[in-house]
Image: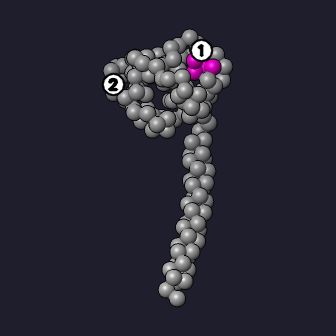
Amino acid sequence: MPASTPGRHRDHHHRDHSDGEDTLGGRISLAREAAGLTAAQAARRLGVMQASWNAWERDRDVPRANRLATMAGILGVGLSWLLTGKGSGPREREPGEDSAQLLRDLRSASLEVAALNRRMQAIADGLERLESDAHR
């Protein structure tokens, strides 16, 4: 099948990241892909515009130093690997790992929502008591 067939082959601009001698942008891109994130998702988690993230991955700009540690955490890599290619880099995910993590995240969020609902109900009950006391 020809290499130009859409959806069948990786983009010919995709760099080989296996030697660790890549650019900062290449490592950001590799780590984001390994984390299973789109550029939009990663940018949102870091609190930056997607255009900024895209510029970093393309080595057209570099993130501020104060963002790099947070970025490393979001991407699940060590800061030194992100900067130099040496150290704790991205790991291969096991099949099904993403869905298992999503289920854990969903359960955790559900518990948080339930706790917030209980707190909101307690506040509403307190307001009702204040109102009824004020009318006596």
Magenta segment's dominant SS is: helix
**What residue sits 56% from the left and 34% below the top?**
74
Viewer-proximal residue among 1 and 20: 20
Direction from residue 111 to residue 56 in the image, left or right: left
Label 1 crowd (10 A; few <14 / some 14-19 / many >=20): some
Location of residue 89 by image quarter: top right
**Which scheme is used to colour this image of the protein?**
one colour
**What residue sits 50% from the left and 23% below the top?**
64
Under mark 1, the amino acid is Thr
* Residue that numbered label 2 is attached to: 5
**Which residues are drawn in magenta?**
80-84
How many marks are shown on the rendered structure? Answer: 2
Label 2 crowd (10 A; few <14 / some 14-19 / many >=20): few
Viewer-proximal residue among 128 and 24: 128
Direction from residue 59 to residue 77 in the image, left or right: right
**Which circle's residue, 1 or 2, is located before the other in the chain?**
2
Q: Position of residue 99 (x, y in %)?
A: 56, 46
* Residue that numbered label 1 is attached to: 84
Instruction: Establish if 129 lies above or below 92.
Output: below
Q: Nearer the viewer, mark 1 or mark 2?
A: 1
Q: Position of residue 62 (x, y in %)?
A: 46, 19
Under mark 2, the amino acid is Thr
The outermost residue toward the right is 87
